[in-house]
Amino acid sequence: MNPGLRGPSAQTPVWAEPVRGFYTDPGQFVALSGLDLLRSVLAGGLGPPIRYLFGLELTSVEPGGVTFTMPVTDWLLFPQGVVSGATLGILADAPLGCTVQTALPPATPFTTAEISLRFLRTVVPQSGTLTAKGRLIHAGQTTGVSLAEITDEAGRLVAVTSTRCAILPRM
């Protein structure tokens, strides 16, 4: 079976399918603060295409705080039956960056410049749905810093993480 195809009878590679999902209307990015933009995404049930691949969901937004969830599914497992750190990084990066975004004015792009992930527990299918809660530490003119804790469905701490985001000039 071609690794780019889904299932034994699939004829279309996943990357050739129509795009589903989007970040936001560019007009909203220019008009809304980061906090209001995230609130709009939450209210509209929208999000980036990666949410469809991983089940990544924005579940709450407040000034200086954002929460995402992601189910542990068999699609996320390495052959050893565990979720890799790289996959866990997808969940970690979402609240880290979006927490910084809550403090930004309209039309202000940013990017992750540095991320640190400290693993405390192995993530396995029995971990259930993971929750990542981000908290803003600092948002200046050029740098944003946030922390996040990732817990499993039983409330056990799985990882702690931090980031430094580069805040770019307004568009």
Image (tube, rainbow, N blue to C red):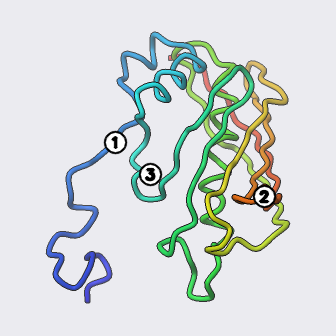
Q: Amino acid at mark 1?
A: Gly
Q: Earlier in the sequence, mark 2 or mark 3?
A: 3
Residue at the image position 40 percent from the left and 53 percent from the top: 52
Q: Earlier in the sequence, mark 1 or mark 2?
A: 1
Q: Amino acid at mark 3?
A: Ile
Q: Secondary structure at mark 1?
A: loop
Q: Amino acid at mark 2?
A: Leu
The Cα–Cα distance between marks 2 and 3, rounded to whole angstroms, is: 20 Å
Residue 106 locus on image (x, y percent): 54, 13
User: For residue 87, which quarter of the picture?
Assistant: bottom right
The Cα–Cα distance between marks 3 and 1, rounded to whole angstroms, is: 8 Å
The Cα–Cα distance between marks 1 and 2, rounded to whole angstroms, is: 27 Å
User: For residue 105, which quarter of the picture?
Assistant: top right
Q: Secondary structure at mark 2?
A: strand
Report which residue position mark 1 lands on. Answer: 21
Residue at the image position 66 percent from the left and 40 percent from the top: 95
Q: Relative to 40, say whether 117 is above or below.
A: below
How crowded is the residue under tag 3: few (<14 C-alpha within 10 Å), some, or many (20+)? some
Residue 3 locus on image (x, y percent): 32, 82
Q: Would residue 28 appear left or right of 170 to someone viewing this image? A: left
Residue at the image position 22 percent from the left and 85 percent from the top: 8
How crowded is the residue under tag 1: few (<14 C-alpha within 10 Å), some, or many (20+)? some
Q: Marks 1 and 2: which is nearer the front?
A: 1
Q: Relative to 132, say whether 3 is above or below.
A: below
Report which residue position mark 2 lands on. Answer: 117
Q: Would residue 39 appear left or right of 53 to someone viewing this image? A: right
Q: Earlier in the sequence, mark 3 or mark 1?
A: 1
Residue at the image position 61 percent from the left and 38 percent from the top: 111
Q: What label sits on residue 50 in the rendered view?
A: 3
Circle 1/circle 2 CB separation < 8 Å: no
Circle 3/circle 1 CB separation < 8 Å: yes
